[in-house]
Image: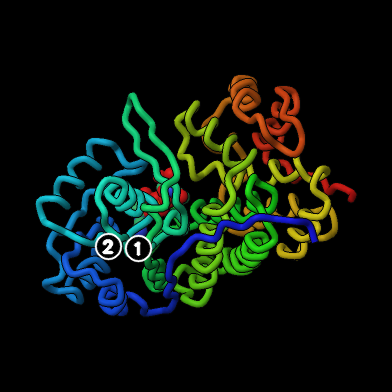
Amino acid sequence: MKPFVYDALPGRTVFAVGALSRVGDELSRLGGGRVFLIVDAQAKEFGDALAEQLGSLVVQQWHEVVQHVPFELAERARAAVTDAGADTVVCLGGGSSTGLAKAIALTHDVPILAVPTTYAGSEQTPIYGLTDARHKQTGKDLRVVPKVVVYDPALTVGLPPQVTGPSAFNALAHCVEALYATGCNPVTSAMALEGVRAIRQSLPRVMDAPGDLDARGDVLYGAYLAGIALGTTSTGLHHKLCHVLGGMFNLVHADTHSIILPHAVAFNAAALPDEMARLEGALGAAPGDAAGALHDLALESHVPTRLSELGLGESDLDEAAVAGAAEITTNPIPVTVDALSTLLRDAYRGVRPQPTHH
Ligand code: NAD
């Protein structure tokens, strides 16, 4: 056994179909009496049910939720928390709702109870982010980690396929990168591999039958584990490259995950024989074929597999390779412009990565 350090994060998790009805009990346990309730507009039906359950405990509701948490929005929400005299924030929605709750917890001494409705995993991490045209503030702070997370798979059955697939692939990518990213250790690797197994087995079922509650539960469980994995480790080549592509070409960031992940894994496979063997086990892949199995899973799940599908031109790839190589300075295999160019060309055409021998 190799030596390791594992900084586990605190937090209580309640996971069950119907768990939404337990939020009131969890609030009493937490000691919260004046709730600021953030609800994503797309999840309003569940938000209304929650507001009814909590009754007079809710001192203010908030429905304005925007991707990447604009500073201006955070400032208004913080002022509303102060005005309402709230002592707890409950957020129901995806990563953007959780992100707003985190922005509040950063400046107000309030615990968060999170009720996730997507597979973002943000509810398990100390990472926060705030943006506007001129600033981007990101960081890690233990104050933003939710004290309680209530997962109810029933809240995810209405998630449209164009959110479900990319959101689940993002979670899958967090599990995969957690196997070798900075901060990895055997405990989070075990969780990450379980996350890969859960998502691998259930994502195609969910994409074919969105109302399959059992399969929805498995994907949400995988996303929960992905959140822990991300919260303890960090991101690597895959997420950094998706970020570069999303930023340069104004792509829907989430759509890049299923395209890039197989190629990012193929890129690093030769340097990570032990991690790849375990990943193959979790994916049910043939020896040396983890990257290929991820590509097959993307096809089976009807999510994008070619950069050309996203409106990118082949001539854009060289610019992206230069930017990516400058950005990605730590990786098991050194990232050169030429190597990244080849990776991006494969991703552009959506070729199935070749098996490696280890
Ligand atoms: P999101 O919260 O914006 O949700 C995506 C879409 O799904 C939105 O249109 C939303 O309205 C809709 N939606 C949410 N719940 C729904 C439901 N039950 N039914 C129907 N539609 C629903 O985004 P996301 O994909 O959940 O998360 C991505 C965001 O989270 C990004 O901003 C990302 O940076 C952030 N994030 C942060 C961390 C972290 O650790 N801080 C981790 C992962 C993601």
Q: 286 above or below 17? A: above
Please state if 204 lies on the left or on the right of 161 as rendered: right
Residue in the image at 25% along x and 59% along y: 89
Identify the secondary structure beneath mark 2. strand
* Circle number at residue 305: none
Residue in the image at 55% along x and 41% along y: 256
Identify the secondary structure beneath mark 1. strand
Q: 126 above or below 27? A: above
* Crowd class of label 1 (few under 14; some 14 to 19; many from 20; radius 10 Å): many
Residue in the image at 54% along x and 60% along y: 8
Mark nearer the N terminus (2 vs 1):
2
Residue in the image at 34% along x and 34% along y: 131
Q: Amino acid at mark 1?
A: Ala
Is residue 166 visible in the rendered structure shown here?
A: yes
* Crowd class of label 2 (few under 14; some 14 to 19; many from 20; radius 10 Å): many
Q: Mark 1: is the Cβ under 8 angstroms from ligand 1? A: no
Res 320 → quadrant: top right
The image position of residue 96, as x and y in percent, is 35, 49
Q: Mark 2: is the Cβ under 8 angstroms from ligand 1? A: no
Instruction: Residue under label 2, please give it.
Output: 90
Which of the pair 93/123 is nearer the observer? Answer: 123
Image quarter where the N terminus lies is: bottom right
Instruction: Residue under label 1, please give it.
Output: 114
Disc 2 to disc 1: CB gap under 8 Å:
yes
